[in-house]
Image (spheres, rainbow, N blue to C red):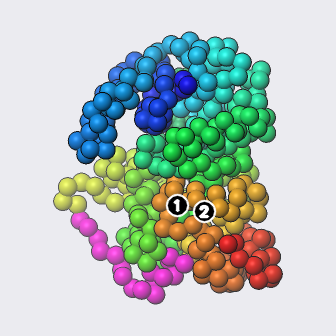
Amino acid sequence: MVVGVLGAGTMGAGIAQVAAQNGSEVVLVDLNKEMLTKAETNLDKVLARLVEKDSISEDEKINIQGRITYSTDIHDFKACKIVIEAIVEKLEVKHSVFANLEAIVSQDCILASNTSSLSIASIGSVLKNPTRVIGIHFFNPAPLMPLVEVIPAVQTSDATLNFSKELISNWKKVGVICKDTPGFIVNRVARPFYGEALRIYEEGIADFETIDWAMTSIGGFKMGPFTLMDYIGNDINYAVTESVFEAFYYDPRFKPSFTQKRHKEAGFYGRKSGRGYYNYAEGAEIIAPNQDSNLGYSIFERILVMLINEAIDAVFMNVASIEDIDLAMTKGVNYPKGLLKWADEIGLDMVLSKLEVLFTEYGEDRYRPNPLLRRMVKEGKSFF
Ligand SMILES: NC(=O)c1ccc[n+]([C@@H]2O[C@H](COP(=O)([O-])OP(=O)(O)OC[C@H]3O[C@@H](n4cnc5c(N)ncnc54)[C@H](O)[C@@H]3O)[C@@H](O)[C@H]2O)c1
């Protein structure tokens, strides 16, 4: 089977590698020849490292490389069974590209988008046969991150969905199905990890170092929110927050933060610019966190209950199943536990009472406990 990948940037090159490593023939197309050359050279390096580590043989390396054809011409997608688009995140560009693709590919070729934030229904609206559109959202770096969100739009046929699910499982990825809603699962449920951490900082409760320490040492997260935002880039992370906020009709739960906006405006993007919340220059001063355990626990619990409330809202609004929401957060962003399982462990009544304290103190809608949480506590239920 031939798989098309459009866009040879960070995501497209990674998706092409995943497909080729799992036996699919791949046509990788980019308008920019340099990006194709870069993708080819990078893949050679990555595979050479895998050979060194004995993860693959030299023959396998040659076979994987032989399965990818690099091209600047989308007409080379003619024989593809599916094309996964991973180009710039602009709706108008995706619209024109999808209409062009449909004129080239076969009647039954599936047209998928790797978009992080755009509506799949809107992307599919330009197609003559919109039942073939679907979202297939990989995480960065695609060859390493096990999670893939599969997003059927309102127009998507069962055949398109079933084919996509099977493909993702043949590529040995963990597929979760989610509704075509802003941020899908991960980028919606994870918002408070950043937003509540920023809010705690803005209120002067603790500095970046202390909040990161609380979330890693007490919470067991691999990275603290500020280290992670610096890693993702404050420009990118702020843009996602703003787009989710707008897409949810300005629901105060998703309100962006001035602190992050100012960091972005100042060019303090994080690691890539040498400075974000932290200074990455050689010899820069390292500030020790305040390791007061009461303070640490209160920070961790406040962020955790906000995350749990968001995960519960995703269940409440039927964005995905309980199992898939927990899988998404552990396999897509490496959370130490699924948030719903975590909620069961703490006790839903405890989660509710902590949210109620915040809601009463602040009087802000941001802290309103989800109706499903209230209902489950009343009925003495748990998620698992
Ligand atoms: N970077 C991430 O962490 C990440 C994660 C998940 C999803 N995504 C999504 O994946 C998509 C691609 O993101 P990326 O980070 O790989 O971008 P990127 O900028 O690294 O790569 C985009 C590539 O598309 C090419 N391109 C642009 N317009 C084109 C066209 N009309 N035809 C052919 N090629 C074209 C560019 O030359 C470039 O090589 C976006 O929709 C993004 O939202 C990104």
Disc 2 to disc 1, C-alpha distance? 6 Å
Give the x, y percent position of residue 18. Answer: 46, 37
Q: Secondary structure at mark 1?
A: helix
Q: Which residue is mark 1?
A: 330
**Image quadrant in which you'd find residue 49:** top left
Circles 2, 1 touching at the beta carbon (< 8 Å): yes
Mark 2 beta carbon near ligand 1 (under 8 Å): no
The quarter of the rendered structure image containing the N terminus is: top right
Q: Amino acid at mark 1?
A: Thr
Q: Is residue 246 above or below residue 103?
A: below
Q: Secondary structure at mark 2?
A: helix
**Image quadrant in which you'd find residue 9:** top left
Total count of labels: 2
The quarter of the rendered structure image containing the C terminus is: bottom right
Q: Which residue is mark 2?
A: 326
Observer-nearest of 273 and 118 = 118
Relative to residue 135, is residue 25 drawn left or right? left
Give the x, y percent position of residue 76. Answer: 53, 14
Residue 372 visible (yes or no): yes
Q: Amino acid at mark 2?
A: Asp
Give the x, y percent position of residue 122. Answer: 73, 33
What segment is highlighted magenta in the picture? 285-301
Let me know if residue 297 is in the magenta part: yes
Let me know if residue 33 is in the magenta part: no
Q: Residue at x 46, y 49 (%)?
A: 145
Q: Residues within 10 Å of mark 2 (few under 14, many from 20)?
A: many
Q: Residue at x 44, y 56 (%)?
A: 229
Residue 235 visible (yes or no): no
Q: Is residue 274 above or below residue 86?
A: below
Q: Which mark is residue 261?
A: none
Observer-nearest of 192 and 58 = 58
